[in-house]
Amino acid sequence: MKRKLASVLLSTVVAASLLAGCGGNETSSETSGSEKTAKEETSDKTYPELDLNPTEALSVSTEGIQAAAPSAFTLTDEDIQKLKDGKYKAAFCYHTQSDTCNQTKLANAKKMLEDWGIETVSVTDANFDAATQTSQIESTMALKPDVLFVMPYDADACASALDANVKGTDTKLVFMENVATGYKAGTDYAGCASSDSYGNGKACADILAKEIGYKGQVGMMFYDLVYPVTNERDRGFRETIENSYPDIEIVMESGFTDPNDTGTVADAILAKYPDIDGIYASWDIPAEGAIASAQSVGRDDLIITCCDLGDTAAKSIATDGMIRGSGAPRSPEQGQAEALVAAYALLGKEMPSTFVTPPALPVVKSNLLDAYKTSYGIEAPDWLQDLTK
């Protein structure tokens, strides 16, 4: 279906929902397909094992720049000494610091910068308010940081604030997750660090395909506005199903703009295709609408995959519920990627890419606890560990 143009209001509402939550279903009597380790066969086709530890970044930026993984960036002892001698200052302007993912990214970025002698002089939290972020960018620049990290809330408003306060200065600009409207890599900003959204969408497709036996009908519940993170996830899922699984058909793609009101979207899919085998959702909160809808019509056997690893998704994966797997961010590595982009910019080194993402993180029951630690940088909570025993 055709994508609708993003209104500022709807984009900012979904940004709050999507980025604030980077943190019981019926138990199936069947063994989850994600627990099988041998190659799967369906008819005369053989499919490889699910790769739970990909090493390549697959996403492409809005400017068409292919992502590089942080492992492509290296600093020599001489580079590090130059950073220490520079006595540089860094500042962060977040759209929110209320979620575990952003807190983890910040902690890892600050630690790496500190190891290189770079002082963090300011961290601001706009609390999902464009006007607040504009004011914070202005006040932060009064500190004359050598590098400014910005996670835009409203890409248009952020561009205006940066035009007025950062452009034309010596401050190096590093974006986190999203890029301000009209800004060009290598010209207006040094680089952007994000998660491998395409790779995580691909992981959702691979997991869903495995769980339904590599054949059948599936539906998509996709975010129907222009938002690069989710758009790349959806593209990754769609293209992987279409290109890698010839016996799986995407029979319906239904868009939503309010992530807290996706039940009607799932209702429509299940009404038209009551025997559908699986559904993909752009992230875990919209997937909850699909769960409720499926339960209401007795489809407790529906298989769902989604991006992110919130509590609902983690619990469902642990208990063989409807959500059988996800593609999750590697927050510690993403924070390190932010620091590496800044270091290269300060040193004037040519970057492997101005778009940097850690590889995707496919999550299924067999690697759930390890994946949780990789995604959040902390051990899984006791309740989740208990569910996996």
Image (cartoon, rainbow, N blue to C red):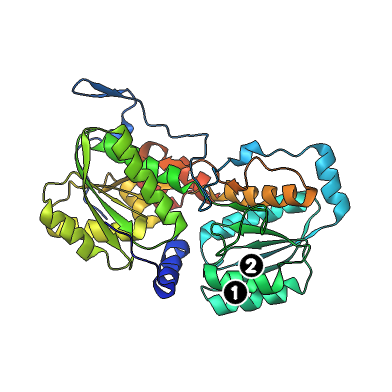
* Amino acid type, callout 1: Gln
Q: Residues within 10 Å of mark 2 (few under 14, many from 20)?
A: many
The residue under label 2 is 93
Assess whether mark 1 and mark 2 are in contact (beta carbons under 8 angstroms).
yes
* Residue that extends furthest to the right in the rendered view of this protein: 85
Location of the C terminus by quadrant is top left
Q: CA distance from mark 2 to mark 1?
A: 7 Å
For marks 2 and 1 on the same chain, the one whose residue lies earlier in the sequence: 2
In the image, is 111 to the left or to the right of 319? right
Q: Indicate the quadrant containing the N terminus: top left, top right, bottom left or bottom right.
A: bottom left
Q: Secondary structure at mark 1?
A: helix
Secondary structure beneath label 2: strand
Q: Is residue 54 left or right of residue 307?
A: right
Q: Tell me which residue sits at (61%, 76%) in the image.
A: 134
Residue 23 seen in the figure: no
Point out residue 387 in the picture as x, y percentages from the top left corner. 35, 47
| Residue 278 x/y as whole percent | 22, 45
- Quarter occupied by residue 39: top left
The residue nearer to you, when weighing 366 against 362, is 362
Residue 371 vs 210, above or below: the answer is below
